[in-house]
Amino acid sequence: MFEVYLILITCFLLPICYLITNSLKYIYNQIEILKSIQKTKNKKNIHNKHIMSIANIYMNRKQWLDCITMLEFYINQNTIDEIAVKAQYCNCIGLCYQSAYIYKMAQKYYLKAYNKLPFKKEILKNLVNIYKISGDIESANKIDQKLILLNKHHNI
């Protein structure tokens, strides 16, 4: 009888241990990313990969305002000349606003990203989704047609 009790307890505790281990691994990875960024001397010139890593950490923690503030800061830096980077930041800000249920601002940032990179699938998908959420089906259909054409050209 004692062996059955131990087997049942083990079967119950193993999934819990697995979940805790995954959570600790995730937190450890976040800390390592932040430590590597902290070593940089000039905080204004952090590499785009690190900025997006921090943005993803904020988004996973549902800290929308922190993510938006940080990305706005880096968009407004004169050191960023790449259009693709600015479009990526605008798209991420749009995701934050959409997650915070502020759809007008999300649409504004998705459109900024779209104007910078009109053929990026991720931006087009987000724009279609926000138009559908806002009830603008006509605009959603137009962007959806562009997305379909883009997919056809990539498959050829």
Image (cartoon, helix red, strand yellow):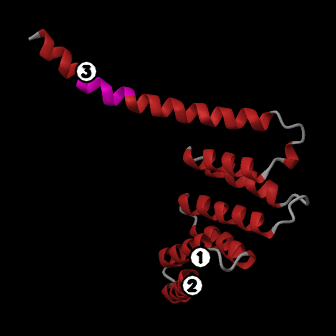
Count neighbours of disc 3 (C-alpha within 10 A) and say few if under 14, some if 14 to 19, many if 20 or more.
few
The image quadrant of residue 89 is bottom right
Gap between marks 3 and 2 measured at Cα: 53 Å
Residue, x 56% and y 71% (percent of image)? 126
Horizontal and vertical percent position of residue 124 = 59, 76
Q: Which residues are magenta?
A: 10-17
Count neighbours of disc 1 (C-alpha within 10 A) and say few if under 14, some if 14 to 19, many if 20 or more.
many
Provide the secondary structure element on which disc 3 rests: helix
Gap between marks 1 and 3 measured at Cα: 48 Å
Gap between marks 2 and 1 measured at Cα: 7 Å
* Residue nearer the viewer, 34 or 95: 34
- Location of the N terminus (image quadrant): top left
- As drawn, the label of residue 58 is none
Q: Nearer the viewer, mark 1 or mark 3?
A: 3
Q: Answer whether residue 14 is magenta in the image.
A: yes
* Residue nearer the viewer, 54 or 29: 29
Residue of label 3: 10
Residue of label 1: 124
Q: In this rendering, would 79 be left or right of 106? A: right
Horizontal and vertical percent position of residue 111 = 67, 76
Kindly indicate whether the residue at mark 2 contacts the one at mark 3 (C-beta within 8 angstroms). Answer: no
* Residue nearer the viewer, 42 or 49: 49
Q: In this rendering, would 2 be left or right of 77? A: left
Residue of label 2: 143
Q: Earlier in the sequence, mark 3 or mark 2?
A: 3
The image quadrant of residue 153 is bottom right
| Three-letter code for the amino acid on which mark 1 is drawn | Leu
Horizontal and vertical percent position of residue 151 = 54, 81
* Residue nearer the viewer, 58 or 64: 58
- Location of the C terminus (image quadrant): bottom right
Give the dominant element type of the magenta stretch: helix, strand or loop: helix
